Image: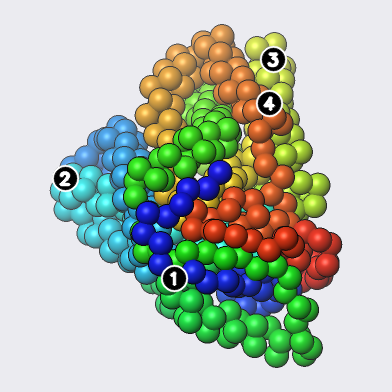
Amino acid sequence: MTTAPADPGPTVTTNIPARLDRLPWSRWHWTIVIGLGTVWILDGLEVTVVGNIAGRLSEPGSGLAISSGQVTGLAAALYVAGACVGALFWGRMTDRFGRKKLFMITLAVYLAATALTGLSFDAWWFFLFRFLTGFGIGGEYAAINSAIDELIPAPYRGRVDLMINGSFWVGAVAGSLLSIPALNTDFLAADVGWRLTFALGAVLALVILLVRRHVPESPRWLMIHGRDREAEQVVSGIEQRIEEEQGRPLPEAHGEITIHQRRAVSFLEIGRTVFSDYRKRAVLGFSLFIGQAFLYNAITFGFGAILTKFFHVPADHTGYYFVVIAVGNFLGPLLLGKLFDTVGRRVMISTTYLLSGVLLFGTAWLFDQGALGAGTLTACWCAVLFFASAGASSAYLTVSEIFPMETRAMSIAFFYALGTAAGGISGPLLFADLTGTGNIGDTVLAFSIGAVLMCVAGLVAALLAVNAERRSLEDIAKPLSAVAAKAKAASAGREGGIAPPSSSPA
C-alpha cells in the first residue's frame, strides 16, 4: 500500500520513530501539550463569545452597524468558510514546509485577525476578519494534530489527542462565563465590553505563541525531508532532558525503518494514496466526521430555541444550561481517553458513536412523550455528548494516524474541512428550520437524523476502524518514502514494555 517516491533522495536507515515512541511520559511532553494543545481552548472561546455577543452588537451604541442575524448567520458562515479554506491551504503547506513553521504562522494569523476583529468600525471589517480568524484556526487543526501525534509516544497518543481536542469545551465554558461581565453595561460601556473579549483572545494567543517557540520541529518530518542531522539533534536533546528528569538511562529502542528522503509529495500522489490505496480508511474518515457533525448540529442548532419555546426558559438564562452541556463535552474525552489506548481504538470508537446515537434516540422518544423538562433534557444532552465528544475527538485522532506521514496534515485538513462544511452549511439549513418551528415532531426528526448518522458511523467503525493503539505511526501506515523495514515493530510500547506512569495525562 505504498507508492515509490517520484523524487527519491538519499537512502537512510533510522530508529528515530522507535526512540520517540519508547520515551516515558515527562515534563517535556506536558510542554508540548500546553504549547500546542491549548489553542482549542481559544477556538471554543472564540465561537462561544461571538454567539453570546450577537445581541449586544445589534444594539444602538455598540459601535457597529450590524444585526444579530448577521453575526450568527453571515459572520458565522464566513468563519466556517475561512476554517475550511485555511485547513486545506495550510494543510498542504504543513506537509511541505514543516509542522513548526506552520503552527507558528497559523497562530500568528489567528492572533492578528482576532485583535483586528475587536477594532471593527464597520460590518465589512468585522466580516473580513471573522473569515481570517477562521482561516488561521483551520490551519491550526492540520499543523497541530500532525505535530502532536508525531511527538507524543505511542502508548499515550490516543488519550492526549482526545484530551486536547476535547479542550475546545473548556474554551466554550470560559467564553460563556466571560460574556456575562463583558456584556454588563454596569461595568463596561456597550461599545467596549465586546471588544475586550476579542482582545483577551489575542493576548492568550500571544502567550501560547511565546510557549510554542520551545516546541521543536517533528523529527519524523525532518527525517523524511533530508534533514536527518537536525532530527538526530532534536531527539538526542529530548532524550537527554528526560534522562536527567528520570535520573536513569532510557530503555533501548527497538526497530528501524529505511527510507528514501524526499522534498515534496504531489497532490496526485496524495489523492491516490488516500482515496485509492487507503480507500477503506477514507470511508472510515468520511463516516466519522459526517456522523459527529450532524449529531452536534442536531442538538446545538436547536439548543436555545428548544429551551425557550418548549420550556419557557428566558433567553438570557440559556447560557447556564450551555455551560452544563459544555462541561459534559469536556469530561467525555478526559475520562474515556485512556481507554482508547488500553481497550483499543476499534472498540472505543464504535462504542462511543453507537452509545451517543442510541442515547439521542432515547432522548427524542422521551421528548416526544412530553416526559422531559428543561433540566432533564439538559441531563439527557449531557449523557449523549459525554460519549459523542470522545467519539468526535477520536475522529481527528483517526485521520491523523491512519494515513502515511507524507499525507498526514493534508488528510487531517481534508476531513476537517469536510466535517466543518457539513456542520456549518448543511447543519444550519436542516436543523435550524426543524428545531425552530416549535413543533415537537420536527424536533424529534432533527434528533433522529443526528442519531441515525452517528449509529451508521459507529457501525462503519466497528468494521473498518484500525487497531492503532500503542503502535508506531510508521507501523499503522508505512511512509510513502519507506523502502524497507526491520522485522521488529518500531514501537516498543505495543510490545508491552512501557507501563504508563502515574503522572501520565488523563
In the rendered structure, the answer to whether residue 303 lies left or right of residue 204 reads right
Q: Pick the quarter of the image with the C terminus.
A: bottom right
- The part of the image, by quadrant, that contains residue 428 is top left
- Estimate the spatial distance between the alpha carbons at disc 2 and disc 3, rounded to whole Å: 44 Å
Residue 127: horizontal and vertical position, in percent?
Answer: 23, 45
Residue where numbered disc 1 is placed: 10
Q: Earlier in the sequence, mark 3 or mark 1?
A: 1
- Residue drawn at x 76%, y 66% is 492
Tags 3 and 1 touching, CB below 8 Å: no
Residue 71: horizontal and vertical position, in percent?
Answer: 30, 39
What amino acid is labelled 4 in the image?
Answer: Leu
- Estimate the spatial distance between the alpha carbons at disc 3 and disc 1, rounded to whole Å: 62 Å
- Residue drawn at x 48%, y 48% is 3
> Height in image: 235 above or below 107?
below
- Estimate the spatial distance between the alpha carbons at disc 4 and disc 1, rounded to whole Å: 44 Å
Residue where numbered disc 4 is placed: 459
Question: In the structure shown, which secondary structural element does the residue marked by tag 1 occupy?
Answer: loop
